[in-house]
Image (cartoon, rainbow, N blue to C red):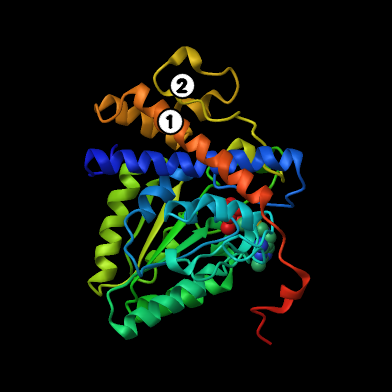
Amino acid sequence: MLPELGEDQLRELFQTMLVMRRFEEALITLAGEFDVGHFHVYIGQEATGAPALGLLEDGDFGFTTHRNHGHLLARGVDPARMMAEILGRETGTNQGKGGTLHLSSLEHGFPVTSAATGGCIPLATGAAFGFSKLGNRRVSVCLMGDGSLEEGAWHESVNIAALEKLPIIYLCENNSLEALGQRANEYPSSSMAASPLTGLAAVFGMPAVAIDGFDAGEVHDTMNIAIARARAGDGPTFIEARTVRWPGSRPLWPQLLTGELDLTIAWDETALPDEHVEWHRSQDGILRFTRELIEAGNLTPEQALEIDAGVKAQMKEAVQFALDSPYPPPEAALDHVYA
Ligand SMILES: Cc1ncc(C[n+]2csc(CCOP(=O)(O)OP(=O)(O)O)c2C)c(N)n1
Ligand SMILES: [Mg+2]
């Protein structure tokens, strides 16, 4: 379903999702030609991150994981500076010293990013504790994978959040729905005895809901309620956004196994490839959102392609900016090191 937003906002959301997708497609392509090192991509989860983070206001914080690129892009961080950061360049968001695993940008509400599984949980909870003490009506969003529920930090943090009624939303992106990865002996996500995962939050007495993470409208509406609750001082919410892992993220290194996103599949069944049919037909959240926008008369296929062409050109420039940027000088190695 479509989020309850005006036409301009719906199109903005569409463009944001395309920025998220085209950025990482460009990164995977670049990694084929250039040693980028290891990285993780958010491809396939855009319909969760874009509407959820689009609801935040200036001063609200997000704390993300090793799969952070899409989250920062959703809050408007410059793709060129992010690409430069991933390539370790001086012009990067963190002057080339954070890299893909620690992308952050305080001015966009991402003060620090931890790639330790579960690391985001105490960070986000601590920020919410600070907001609560300041009484400033700001909210903290913990963008966590299902795997982080295995960590002890989850249980300790959520207890404090519930006791103190902290202004926090635990947005758990569960991309483990299909056990395909495990079956094919690929990269596993989580192994939890608890089922459903929402039970791990409900036991602390907070609203805990499971939603379809491919459904931008459901994500938007659920987040909206959770944010209002947090701002009103009524405490935390746990949201499990359920998706499946993008086929290209099943091998250890991301690969464009489903090809680059072809938007025409959204309105032309004959464009549907023979492989990964299920993915293209019902799982790719961007294709689903495109279909919904067109069916509701908020976008034409021509407009969709035009927006996409602009985004692709922007990503080409981002890659070039990164490649043209210098590495930090050796003398800068100890700058910003506190010991
Ligand atoms: C403390 C810790 N243990 C192990 C790892 C290695 N590791 C990297 S990604 C990952 C899986 C995390 O699963 P999940 O939180 O569901 O995120 P997903 O990759 O599925 O988005 C693991 C175990 C890590 N980064 N930190
Ligand atoms: Mg996972």
- Mark 1: secondary structure: helix
- The residue that appears at 50% across and 50% down in the rendered structure is 70
* Image x and y of residue 105, in percent: 50, 65
Q: Nearer the viewer, residue 270 or 35?
A: 35
Question: Distance of mark 2 from mark 1, alpha carbons?
Answer: 7 Å
Q: Residues within 10 Å of mark 2 (few under 14, many from 20)?
A: some
Q: Amino acid at mark 2?
A: Ile
Please report contact status of discs 2 and 1: CB closer than 8 Å, yes or no: yes
Quadrant of the snapshot with the C terminus:
bottom right
- The residue that appears at 70% across and 37% down in the rendered structure is 184
Q: Mark 2 = which residue?
A: 265
- The residue that appears at 67% across and 66% down in the rendered structure is 97
Displayed-image quarter of ligand 1: bottom right
Task: Give the side of residue 162 with respect to residue 252, left or right.
Answer: left
Q: Mark 1 = which residue?
A: 287
* Image x and y of residue 258, in percent: 60, 29
Q: How many marks?
A: 2
Q: Amino acid at mark 1?
A: Leu
* Image x and y of residue 22, in percent: 53, 38
